Structures are given as C-alpha cells and as structure tokens.
Image: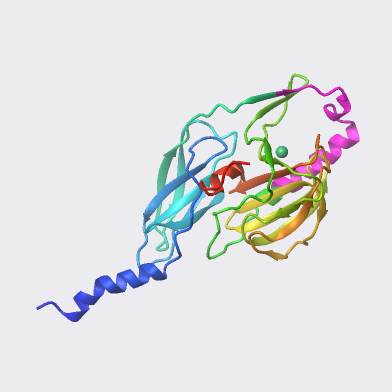
Amino acid sequence: MRSHAALLAPLIILAQMLAAPAAAALPRAANVPGGVALVALGPLAPGIPQPHAWLGEQAVLVAADHGQWVAVVGLALDTPIATHELRVVEASGEARSVHFPVVGKRYPEQRITLKDTRKVDLSASDLARVEGEMKTIQALKQHWRATPETDTDFVLPAEGRLTGRFGVRRYFNGEARSPHAGFDIAVPTGSPVKANARGTVLAIGDFFFNGKTVLVDHGNGLLSMYCHLDRIDVAPGDPVEKNQVVARSGMTGRATGPHLHWSVILNGAMVDPWLFVSPNVRKP
Ligand code: ZN
C-alpha cells in the first residue's frame, strides 16, 4: 500500500507551485533589434529560488511564467543579427550558458525637412549640454532595483492618435539621426500621463531634446520614460500605482507638436513599448 506521504506529495508540489510568483503577463516575444527575447531557463522547482541571468555585464529580468523561469531580455536597436549568449547562474551557484537567436527587422524610414537648420545643426553650447544629458540618461537606463515581482502587463499612458512608431529610421534634411526609440501619442497639452505599471519614480529632469521628463522604475531593470511633459506631478522616490497620473503632457524640448513620447527600457535597452501592451488593447 502506498503511504500517505506518497499520496500527498503531488498535492504539496501543487501547493508550492501555487505559492510561487503568479504567472506575469509577459511581453510578446520579438527576437529582433528593439524587441524582447523570452528565453526559457527551466521549470520552477519547489523551494528553489529563481536563477539569475546576464547579457554581457547587464543583469536581465527573470520571471515565472506557466511553471517555467523565463529570462525577459531587452534587445537594443543596434543588437547584432546573430546568436546571443545569456549567462545563467542557478541558486545553487551552478553556471551555464543559454543561447538565443536575434533576426533582422527592417523598420520604416521617415524623411523630415526642417527649414530651421538650428534644430538640426546644434550650437557648440547646445551640443555640450546634449552630451552631458546623454551621459545622465545613459546612467539612468542602467539602473537596477531588485524587486520580488515586476509588472510587465502595461496599460497605455495616454489616450490619443499614434503619431510615431518605435524604430522608425529618421533623416532630418537628408542626414541620418538616431532611430525613434519610443512611441508617440498625440494628445493636447495638459492631458493626463498615467504610469503604465506600478513602480517608483527614479528621476525627473528637463532635457534639451526630451524636455520635461519622468522616469519610472518598475523593478528588475524595467523602466518607463515619459517626455515633452508640460508639468510633472511626482518627485524622485515616489511610489506610483498603475494608472496613477504622474504628469501632464506638453511639447517641451524638441517637439514639433504636443504629444507624449513614451520609451520602455529593459536591461538598459530601449525596446518597443507596444510589446508590453495587452493584445486586447487597440493600437491608438
Ligand atoms: Zn517620440
């Protein structure tokens, strides 16, 4: 006769699985530059903490999904088309490599003619300011705050017409500029800007290109950045809930009209925010 313990074992495992972190709605996978790779790291085991993963020197978000540990890897727009290596360290200390492919994606081009060339060719003082600000933003993008869970199921931070897609390769007066590393939603100045997921305000600023800006840290290397704001209603360190109004939209910095620019940063990489929005939400 089987012992009670043997009969109970599956129930205990089930109970432990239920007590494990709830399956997060992960972003949609897109193994392309500017996308997100979902890399399976193995099954959740009762009582065994999550593994940790690194892409080069950068720590990567690891989430529980359908009984599996999954590395949620942000791929910068300049990621080489190749097989990439994730370094995985188990809770036991055992280390291994997991490989995943990144394939090419051709983003559309946009050619813009600006009559005011001062907006294209910066003065020496503006250039110096921009270089300093780029360093500040670059450092903020690398920010890592470990949290037990990360909400990757985003709502849209504003309701309006989509006017700027992620990844568009922009040319001003024929000169190549950095690709559009965010999502533009046309909204009148003063419209509420809501946190797309819970988090903590990492920083606020007023930048040459981005204008008034709020950065929200969702934990484990996932950040949101809202730009061209008219007014900021939060301060660094403030906790924010999903849907909480953090600012009012505007057209500060270099904006050709009032809109919200929303960037999503994952393990230091600017990725397509749309991958994190529920497929039930219609593109604005
Ligand atoms: Zn934009």
Quadrant containing the C terminus in the rendered view: top right
Q: Point out the quarter of the image occupied by ligand 1.
A: top right
Residue 283 visible here: yes
* Depth order, front residue of 107/156: 156
Query: Which residue sits at x=71%, y=58%?
Result: 202
Viewed as shown, does residue 226 lie left or right of 63?
Answer: right
Q: How many marks?
A: 0
Query: Which residue sits at x=46%, y=49%?
Result: 87
Q: Quadrant of residue 106?
A: top right
Query: Which residue sits at x=84%, y=35%?
Result: 127
Residue 65 placement (x, y as % from top left): 42, 56
**Residue 137 part of the magenta-drawn span:** yes
Quadrant containing the N terminus in the rendered view: bottom left
Residue 12 placement (x, y as % from top left): 30, 74
* Depth order, front residue of 88/34: 34
Residue reaching furthest to the top: 174
**Residue 251 part of the magenta-drawn span:** no
Looking at the image, is 58 positioned above or below residue 125?
A: below
Looking at the image, is 249 positioned above or below residue 148?
A: above
Residue 56 visible here: no
Helix, strand or loop for the magenta stretch, by majority: helix
Q: Which residues are magenta?
A: 111-138
